[in-house]
């Protein structure tokens, strides 16, 4: 049994001051919490500051993206080593907003995964189908294709540090979450794929988390599914009380 992982993706929200206020509230609400791994992904500009604030709390830091090169003339980009330097443990890669607005491909995601593992950071690899793909019955094909692409060339040693996030595109920021059964079906298939590609340990160790309109009122039923090991939370992670309630999900 792995520790559940609840991660909050703040996206392009919060100034440093707003981030500080949010973390101070969260620290208070999550005091003593150790049953769940709690991760927040603020914008790059706040990470350094927040890293001092989370130091003696259960909260860990993630970045929302990374570039795969180690250093060089890549204006505007940030490397894995820089993210480790600033206090990150995790990095989200392949989020559907990056795929959609920044034309990120499975190959890009794969390069990012490799760059992160090389410096000891843990990738949270996002995969998910669009509404049209789901309606055409292509969900499993799309999601497994993205996952295979993201993990190409990875050995059994690297896979244990990877977190997979199933985020149906139609459920992100729409208020329309996948039902626990819909999510479970995809998670189960991805676990089978991990077993086939990387063996039993990987299938057991890798956490597969769900993202898409996770809220206090649906977290308990999602977490009741055997193959849902946590959640990636967007909008609700910006409200301390809601995020804390999600972290403190109840076993139903
Ligand atoms: C996300 O962007 O990863 C996400 C799941 O967003 P929301 O919870 O707002 O749907």
Image (spheres, rainbow, N blue to C red):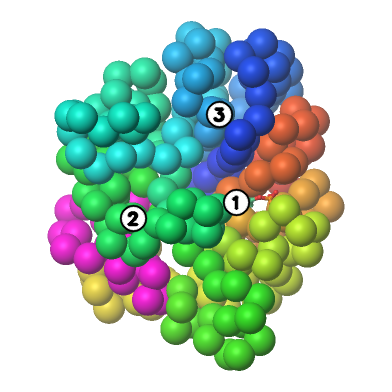
Find disc 1 in the rendering and name its residue: 231
Q: How crowded is mark 1: few (under 14 residues within 10 Å), some or many (20 or more)?
A: many
> Observer-nearest residue: 193 or 149?
149
Q: Which residue is drawn at 44% across and 44% down?
A: 92
Find disc 2 in the rendering and name its residue: 109
Q: Give me the C-alpha separation between circle 1 and circle 2.
A: 20 Å
Q: Does the magenta stretch include residue 157?
A: yes
> Which span of residues is magenta-colored?
144-165
Q: Which residue occupies the extreme bottom position in the image? A: 136
Q: Residue at x 66, y 86 (%)?
A: 135
Q: How crowded is mark 3: few (under 14 residues within 10 Å), some or many (20 or more)?
A: many
Asked if the residue under mark 3 is in contact with the one under mark 1, i.e. CB atoms within 8 Å, the reply is no
Q: Which residue is drawn at 30% across and 40% down?
A: 67
Regarding residue 148, the answer to whether it shows in the image is yes
Q: Quadrant of residue 76?
A: top left
x and y percentages locating residue 248 in the rendered image: 70, 39
Secondary structure found at label 3: loop
């Amino acid at each position: 049994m792995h520790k559940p992982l609840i991660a909050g993706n703040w996206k392009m929200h919060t100034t440093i001051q707003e981030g500080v206020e949010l973390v101070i509230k969260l620290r208070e609400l999550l005091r003593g919490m150790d049953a769940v791994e709690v991760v927040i992904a603020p914008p790059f500009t706040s990470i350094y500051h927040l890293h001092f604030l989370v130091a003696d709390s259960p909260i860990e830091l993630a970045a929302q993206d990374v570039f795969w090169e180690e250093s060089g003339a890549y204006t505007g980009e940030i490397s894995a080593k820089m993210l480790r330097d600033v206090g990150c443990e995790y990095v989200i890669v392949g989020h559907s907003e990056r795929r959609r607005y920044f034309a990120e491909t499975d190959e890009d995601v794969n390069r990012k995964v490799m760059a992160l593992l090389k410096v000891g950071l843990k990738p949270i690899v996002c995969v998910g189908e669009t509404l049209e793909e789901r309606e055409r019955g292509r969900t499993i094909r799309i999601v497994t294709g993205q996952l295979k692409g993201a993990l190409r060339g990875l050995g059994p040693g690297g896979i244990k540090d990877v977190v997979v996030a199933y985020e149906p595109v139609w459920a992100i920021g729409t208020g329309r979450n996948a039902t626990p059964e819909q999510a479970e079906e995809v998670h189960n298939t991805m676990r089978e794929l991990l077993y086939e590609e990387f063996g039993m340990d990987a299938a057991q160790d890798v956490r597969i988390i769900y993202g898409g309109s996770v809220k206090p009122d649906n977290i308990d039923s999602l977490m009741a599914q055997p193959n849902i090991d946590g959640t990636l939370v967007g909008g609700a992670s910006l409200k301390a009380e809601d995020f804390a309630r999600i972290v403190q999900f109840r076993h139903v």
